[in-house]
Amino acid sequence: MRKTLAIVAVAIAAPLAAQSAAPQLPGQKDPSRVTAGTYKTDPGHSLIEWEVNHFGFNDYFGLFGDVGGTLVLDPKNPAAAKLDVTIPVSKVVTASAGLNDHLLRAGKDGGKPDFFGPNPADARYVSQHIIVKGTEATIHGNLTLNGVTKPVTVEAEFVGAGANPMSKKETVGFHGEATIKRSEFGIGYAVPMVSDEVSIDVTVAFEKQ
């Protein structure tokens, strides 16, 4: 009987011991870890995914990387935060080399490009007003894309904060979602066969300066 109880005790204790021994992630969803200051994006770990529907058959997506920008943040007054982000449209990528070329190629016979063209200007998103509720925020801002500026709302969620073990910098991370109509920014090629509505998914890390 004692041997059976001992085996049961070991079986229960082993997973608990393993859990206690597991290293804690540097970033934790703990707002008290956030300190006031100016933060800059970690461009190597910040991405913007876009998604469109293709011919009604399936959804297709691509990525913008090397996202730059600043976040001025005070945890005592999070609604006063200021966000200014730049998106290098020229670095757009998909899983298809042919589609990459299509997105960035010049227009035929001197006409307008179907999408961005070979030398697209960076896009820029600047916050105007932020509403904070717990660890979530609604960001009202202006997006400039393809030479057109329109209001865009981003629903954002705080993911985590802590010290980056590589850079040793205080880091905060967020996830955001938004929806735009690309035709409003002068990118109306193939609508509605390729959906006008574009879903945007943002993951961004900011490092304190």
Image: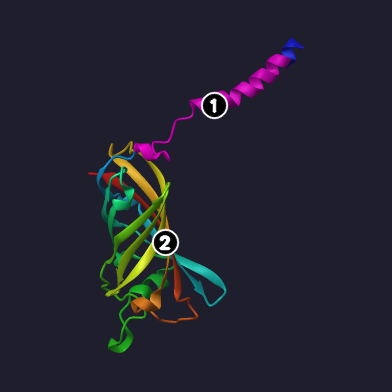
User: Spatial distance from mark 1 to mark 2, Cα to Cα?
Assistant: 36 Å
Residue 39 at what x, y percent from top left? 26, 47
Would you say residue 159 sits in the magenta stretch? Answer: no
Which residue is at a point 61% across and 21% down the rendered structure image? 13
From what the image shows, is residue 81 above or below residue 50? above
Q: Quadrant of the C terminus?
A: top left
Measured as percent of width and height from the top left, residue 116 is found at 33, 75
Q: Residue at x 46, y 73 (%)?
A: 197
Q: Return the mark for residue 112.
A: none
Read off the magenta span. Answer: 5-33
Task: Answer left or right for 25 relative to 13.
Answer: left
Q: Nearer the viewer, residue 3 or 109?
A: 3
> Is residue 29 inside the magenta stretch?
yes
Q: Residue at x 39, y 78 (%)?
A: 183
Q: Label 2 near label 1: C-beta < 8 Å?
A: no
Q: Is residue 113 above or below residue 77?
A: below
Image mark for residue 18:
1
Q: Taking 39 as reference, is 15 left or right?
A: right
Amino acid on which the number 1 mark rests in the picture: Ala
Residue behind mark 2: 49
In percent of width and height, residue 149 lies at 29, 72
Dividing the picture into quadrants, the one containing residue 95 is bottom left
